[in-house]
Image (cartoon, helix red, strand yellow):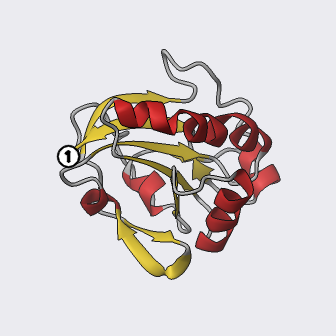
Amino acid sequence: VNCFFMTIAIGDRLPSVDLHEGTPATKVNLQQLFKGKKGILFGVPGAFTPGCSKQHLPSFVKEATALGHKGVEMIVCVAVNDAFVMSGWGDAQGVGGKVRMLADPQGEMAKAMGLVLDNDVVKANLGNARCKRFVCLVEDGIVRHLAISGEAGAKDSEKNPF
């Protein structure tokens, strides 16, 4: 059965999906997490991949304090990986509580947001469909700003998902 999901857009509410933090037993509902808060949600194709480890996650760790001064209450990173991998990646990157590392092990958030990255290059190198690289500013569960890799205005491209 093919299910088509519309890509999330500015003005949309985040989906009510459960993600994992630290262990599979610790579930965090994405919609509830951002209720009444201003935060940044970003997704990457995979933990420990070169681009994500050298540029994407470190940039948010580095800018966390400055973003906090602008009213950002939390920064959340999500990838289609398991909770143990996301936790280990956060430790390896020294996130130190500046970025919450959430796992989307079945890709449910990626599907619900219409952000599934599924092509031959991804499958050959990462094994399964992943999440497109994206970032959004969220206020009280509503997407206020959004950039998706490979789309107009984005600085990078889906051609190299790593």
Vertical comparison of 35 with 155: above or below: below
Identified at 51% across, 50% down, the residue is 98
* Side of 82 relative to 25 (left or right): right
x and y percent of residue 34 in the render?
Answer: 28, 53
Residue 18 falls in image quadrant: bottom left
Relative placement, left or right, of 6 versus 46 is: left
Q: Nearer the viewer, residue 73 or 54?
A: 73
Q: Residue furthest bottom?
A: 25
Residue 35: give x, y in percent of width and height: 21, 55
From this viewpoint, which residue is outermost toward the top? 153
Q: State the residue at coordinates (23%, 46%).
A: 13
Residue type, numbered disc 1: Asp
Label 1 environment density (alpha carbons within 10 Å; few <14, some 14–19, many ≥20): some
Q: Quadrant of the N terminus?
A: bottom left
Residue 152, image x and y in percent? 48, 16
Q: Is residue 85 visible?
A: yes
Decide if residue 128 is in sight here: no
For residue 83, which quarter of the picture? bottom right
Which quadrant is home to the C terminus? Answer: top right
Q: Relative to residue 22, is residue 1 depicted above or below?
A: above
Q: Nearer the viewer, residue 46 or 55?
A: 55
